[in-house]
Amino acid sequence: MLSSTSAAATHDVSEATKFVERNRCITCLSSQLERLSGGSFGDDPLRSYIAADPWGESPLPYLKDESWEFVRCRDCQQMFHKRILSPAWQDRLYRDWVTDAAIREFEAQHGVTSPSTKLENGRNNVRHVLRVEKMTRALRAGETLKILDFGCGWGQFLAAASLFGAEACGVDRDADRLRGAAGVGVRLAPSLDDLPAELKGRFDVVSLFQVLEHLEEPRPVLEMLRGWLRPGGILILETPNCTGITGFDSIENYRDINPLAHINAFTPETLTSIATRTGYTPVQYVPAHATADLLGVAKSQLKGLLGGIKRIVKPTTDQYFRRD
């Protein structure tokens, strides 16, 4: 998610913004890339979309003379932004531009903090916990469920898992979010390297909720996380569904593929592709219910029973996998 609100420290906008180019596919490593769209950050509609977002410090003065290019791999159909901010400028992006206060303002503007949305998000977190608890019972043989949430944000999923007795760990590079998540009573770290080595290969579940679209190199990250997941463990991936998106034809498309933060664009097929290439097998998740509405239970159960059909008729980018 892109966002932020005013009043961060201002830097010298005469500094040259540094970009790097990704000339190989992020999924299959092919160099056969086709250009879907491109242009200047200083041109509309992109300039207006960026200007309308809340920011800690607006990035537009740094970007007005820079270009963007959205490409697709001819071999595996994976889409991504070819030109992305350099590591140092990505640090600035998440430190000075996409600030904690701005993210909260963005969420308030778009109803993310409304009571109904909070309720549904809480129910979704509970459903995930209940599913993976059942899906890993035989694997654990009575042991406590162990979950690693990579890119844990403010820790809502970790809090839900902890309430159900799981040993939950969270990793997030954003210091503000880690401070916010500290109150949920779970182990937190800014990187995998900061977790105890003895936890490697012992997690029953690894989750990435709205994370993969942000990563410069998502494939090596999935390969690395495989080493923290025990054989037979569950991987949860959720990303925006970018099916049919080739450029900034609407504000909704901008939200899904903005060229600063959402640098990778997944479809159901390409999300499955990157996971299977890194040692995971797709699995159908089991139904789970988090409601006092009996009709809701019936609908959820029916959805589970029709899951295989639904995956064919309307696949999604909310997917479960099992480590090979």
Image (tube, rainbow, N blue to C red):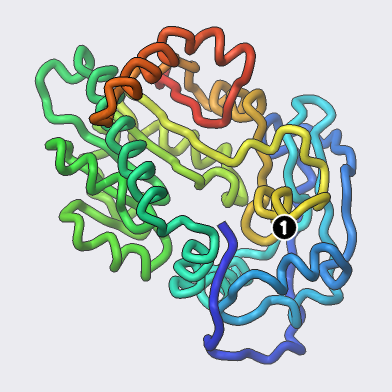
**The N terminus: image quadrant:** bottom right
Find residue 225 and report its horizontal and vertical position in percent: 41, 37
Task: Kindly state the secondary structure of the residue where label 1 is placed.
Answer: loop
For residue 232, say whether it is visible: no
Q: Looking at the picture, tell me which residue is in the foreground, 312 or 281.
A: 312
| Residue marked by disc 1 | 259
Query: Residue visible at 74% across and 77% down?
Result: 60
Query: Residue visible at 48% across and 9% down?
Result: 306
Query: Residue visible at 15% across and 42% down?
Result: 163
Q: Looking at the picture, tell me which residue is in the foreground, 301 or 133.
A: 301
Find residue 305 and report its horizontal and vertical position in percent: 42, 8
Residue at the left extreme, as displayed: 142
Considering only vertical position in the picture, is 115 above or below 73?
below
Looking at the rendering, which quadrant does residue 58 occupy?
bottom right
Looking at the rendering, which quadrant does residue 323 occupy?
top left
Considering only vertical position in the picture, is 158 above or below 49?
above
Query: Residue visible at 57% across and 42% down?
Result: 218
Find residue 3 and report its horizontal and vertical position in percent: 57, 67
So how many labels did they put on this image? 1
Find residue 293 and report its horizontal and vertical position in percent: 28, 27
Considering only vertical position in the picture, is 228 above or below 117?
above
Q: Badge 1, how many Cα within 10 Å: few under 14, some, many 20+?
A: many
For residue 170, say whether it is visible: yes
Q: Is residue 294 left or right of residue 2?
A: left
**The C terminus: image quadrant:** top left
Q: Is residue 61 left or right of residue 171?
A: right
Q: Amino acid at mark 1?
A: Pro
Looking at the rendering, which quadrant does residue 157 occupy?
top left
Q: Is residue 62 left or right of residue 9?
A: right
